[in-house]
Image (cartoon, grey):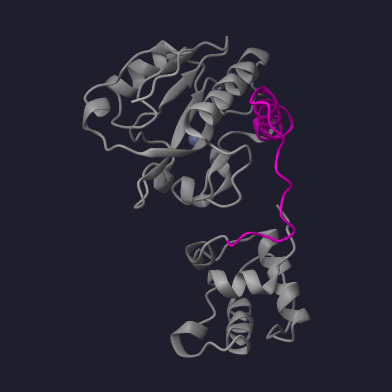
Amino acid sequence: MAWYSGAKKMELQPESDRQNAIRPTQLIFHSIAAPWSPERVYEYWRDSTNLESHFGVGFDGRIAQYIGTQTRADSNMYANERGDGTGAVSVETASNLKHTDPWTDAQVSALIKLGAWMHKRHGVPLRICRSHGDPGFGIHRMFPQWSDGGTACPGDKRSAQFRNEVFPGIVKAAGGKPPKPGKYEPFPGSAWFKREPKSAIVTAMGKRLVAVGCSRYSEGPGPRWTDADRQSYAAWQRKRGFSGADADGWPGKSTWDALKVPRVS
Ligand SMILES: [Zn+2]
């Protein structure tokens, strides 16, 4: 059980004792769509729902912690607790009712300090998560696996602040340099494609499939995953020596890495 000394400890029971242990590898920021103090967030978790986050941050930058960071908490769907024992730590932040407002300066500095602590205490690497399972820092809306298929949380203003202020601030506060992003798009996971996503990653993949002579497109490629993408990808799998169910057109990690899709994120 790890408790952040910069937070007011408001341990939530019975969740704190009953929920499974995790090894935290990610820190994910949210907006709670309510202008609540950390104490009000605690009451909400205690009285109104069986969900909860690890942390709550008020407009004034005060932080409360409800669950130890080595215990599972909710808010991040499939990232809360994984089969390999890892999980994400969740931070809810006060916002307006539609979470369209930016974080206050006090919130930004609180999130930076908390992020630097997560790096020091739990070894969360100083990078923005490259996939839903990748260790690092993120915001809720980044991956559909972190919610029930997608969310607008936090809003656009906070999304920009995360990239331009909060994450760089965490790197600086932790005394590190951000690793250079790789040249190629990391494998998003097979399940991601099965949701028929609309993404620049799908377009970039399609262009590579065309370039390696595996096009089955009559138009495009475009951002929405279609059967033409699947047929083209299956041709690529066959070209790499796969057959039968291994060449079903749903991307897997080894063929994805071999395809060298240029990074778009
Ligand atoms: Zn959220």
Residue 230 lies in quadrant: bottom right
Task: Give yes or no for residue 188 being in the magenta stretch.
Answer: no
Image-based side of 138 in relation to 184, left or right: left
Q: Position of residue 41 (x, y in %)?
A: 41, 18
Residue 176 lies in quadrant: top right
Q: Position of residue 211 (x, y in %)?
A: 78, 80
The residue shown at (74%, 82%) is 212
Residue farthest toward the right in the current orientation of the protein: 211
Q: Which of the pair 42/220 is nearer the observer?
A: 42
Task: Give yes or no for residue 159 being in the magenta stretch.
Answer: yes
Image-based side of 119 in relation to 66, left or right: right
The residue shown at (49%, 12%) is 6
Q: Is residue 127 above or below residue 113?
A: below
Q: Is residue 200 above or below residue 142?
A: below
Image-based side of 235 in relation to 221, left or right: left
Q: Which residues are magenta?
A: 158-187
Q: Which of the pair 229/186 is nearer the observer?
A: 186
